[in-house]
Amino acid sequence: MRPTTPLDRVAGAHDAAVLAVARRGDPVSRAALAQELQVTPQAISKILGRLMERGLVEEAGTVGAGPGKPTTLYRIVPGSRRAIGLHLTRSRLHSVVVDLTGEILERREIETGGLQPVPDLIATLAAQTRSLVDVGPGTLLGVGVGMPGPVDGEEGVYRGTSDPDPWRGAPIRRLLAAELDLPVLLDHDSRAALVGEAWSQPGLLRNAALVLVEDGLGAALCIEDRIVRGAHSHAGEVGHTVVRLGGEQCPCGRRGCAQVEYRAALERGDEELGAQILAEVVVNLVRLVDVDRVVLGGRTVYEQHARSMDAIRDALTEGLRDEPWVHVEVMLSTRGTDLIAVGAACEVLEHKNGLPQLLFGADDRG
Ligand SMILES: [Zn+2]
């Protein structure tokens, strides 16, 4: 396969932009696409031609009465492609199959019984994937894995912590791809979650933070329509920002990190303090990166979401009271506990359908 060139990436980004509009469901005309994407109708024709050739888009009849040629409409073909998404935690594996629009065709969940050695972990991931490979129509593009960090999505490696951690340094993407003979993409759970949420709310999350509260506490950032990775693939690690000097010991080596303080508050039954810590983390994040939407997701936050949302809204009102022109909307994820698995699958669909490769990391199979 020839290497990807900058021109391929531009073409891929155009294809992905047209698919993103088509994903919303209603058939669209060439003119409407040209206007929305600010490119010429001739360019849209070329893009539609490419997408139809690949079976991703099809004609959906015509509209228009009166003189002149009727307008042809186009729509996405949901069943043309699919992807499997796996959400791995230390004790659980949640998996989904989604179609080209991100709709779930099937979901499964198993308990893994704690931290397995790496070979057993890969066997578990592979077995779960194999149980889903025949679900749904269309071509299976690959498998996306979302897991708690630190994860290097570019390298496909789980970096791990200094705690005894059997997964530390494991090249999960390479091992799983070799085991399955399928393309695999590995990413941080919060970044997968942000992609999943962005697919659910197209066009809304241009400057947004997704704050994920699972076993840990993390965030992913979309700034000016780009999901930010950072120099080491660690952008958004708010769980390791200090909220109390000299506080609880964190596995990362520091004291008083938001993640351990939040967890300790919940373990003491002090849900109010937990919500306040989360709220301070969000205000700090908003201060730092100037987003206008904050989406809350993850299992733990669901259990506490009313209290958490109230605390965050109060803290933002208080923290931004001298800047009434700054509006930040706080929302709960629309994807429930499927969020990360769906997001990991959507990353595969995006990766395979043209978004710039560097955004999602190359798979090992080219
Ligand atoms: Zn820490």
Image (cartoon, rainbow, N blue to C red):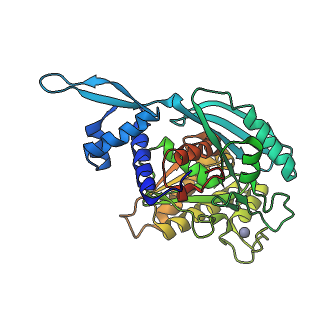
Q: Quadrant of residue 237?
A: bottom right
Closer-to-camera residue (266/103): 103
Relative depth, front residue between 288 and 42: 42
Query: Is 334 on the left-hand or right-hand side of 149?
Result: left
Name the residue at 58% across, 33% down.
139
Which of the pair 285/356 is nearer the observer?
356
Tell me: residue 232, above or below residue 3.
Answer: below
Residue 134 percent location from the top left of the image: 68, 27
Q: Quadrant of ligand 1?
A: bottom right
Residue projecting furthest to the bottom: 246
Instruction: Establish if 359 lies above or below 45.
Output: below
Question: Where in the figure is residue 246, as x and y percent of width and height?
Answer: 75, 77
The x and y percentages for residue 311 are: 57, 56
Residue located 63% across and 41% down the image: 142
Report whether 35 appears left or right of 332. left
**Residue 26 appearing in the image:** no
Specify the quadrant of the image occupied by residue 206: bottom left
